[in-house]
Image (tube, rainbow, N blue to C red):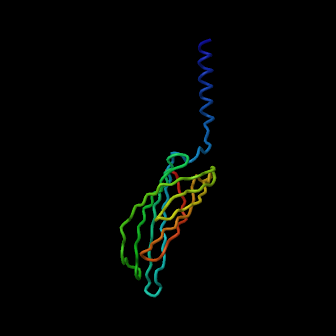
């Protein structure tokens, strides 16, 4: 009788492992990364262009707060040769967010401006997507990155 009881208990606990819930549980405690490089023509007369690369990390600390870390680097070219390479800069911004398991909004302040950044989550690809504009006041230009974040 003891053997039958042990076997029944073992079979029941193994069955529970088969029913593991893989449903999306939200963003709290997750970290996501994205990277993109864009090229922009500065002067067609002198054949001058600039590459700007951003590496972003989203860290959702709980159900309403997180941090956005942006590492940006720039390289300018003239006639295909490197004109100037700017050192990478790291910026970290605290944010609050709302999220309904498919879309949300990140609220933060960047460069003294309050921003509201809408984002979407795809369950099928397990990615987060949003656009981020990096202004470069010293060059009087900006880059808009359409970022796709994957979970770390």
Instruction: Give percent across and percent down for residue 17.
Output: 59, 33
Instruction: Give percent across and percent down for residue 8.
Output: 63, 20
Q: Residue at x 43, y 81 (%)?
A: 48
Q: Indicate left or right for 117 with 35 as reference.
A: right
Residue closest to the eye, 66 or 54? 66
Judged from this view, the residue extending furthest toward the bottom is 45
46 over 97 or under it: above or below = below
Q: Indicate left or right for 142 with 85 as reference.
A: right
Q: Indicate left or right for 65 with 103 as reference.
A: left
Q: Indicate left or right for 56 with 87 as reference.
A: right
Judged from this view, the residue extending furthest toward the top is 1
Residue closest to the eye, 112 or 36? 112
Instruction: Give percent across and percent down for residue 45.
Output: 46, 88
Q: Residue at x 48, y 79 (%)?
A: 41
Q: Residue at x 41, y 75 (%)?
A: 138
Location of the N terminus (image quadrant)? top right
Mark count: 0
148 over 86 or under it: above or below = above
Q: Residue at x 47, y 64 (%)?
A: 112
Instruction: Give percent across and percent down for residue 69.
Output: 45, 57
């Amino acid at each position: 009788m003891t053997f039958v009881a042990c076997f029944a208990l073992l079979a029941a606990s193994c069955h529970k492992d088969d029913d593991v819930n893989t449903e999306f549980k939200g963003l709290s405690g997750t970290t996501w990364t994205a990277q993109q490089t864009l090229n922009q023509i500065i002067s067609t007369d002198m054949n001058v262009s600039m590459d700007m690369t951003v590496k972003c990390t989203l860290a959702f600390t709980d159900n309403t707060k997180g941090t956005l870390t942006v590492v940006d680097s720039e390289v300018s070219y003239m006639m295909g040769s490197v004109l100037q390479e700017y050192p990478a800069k790291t910026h970290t911004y605290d944010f609050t967010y709302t999220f309904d398991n498919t879309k949300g909004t990140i609220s933060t302040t960047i460069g003294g401006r309050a921003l509201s950044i809408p984002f979407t989550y795809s369950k099928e690809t397990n990615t987060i997507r949003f656009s981020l504009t990096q202004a470069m006041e010293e060059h009087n230009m900006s880059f808009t990155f359409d970022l796709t974040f994957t979970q770390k």
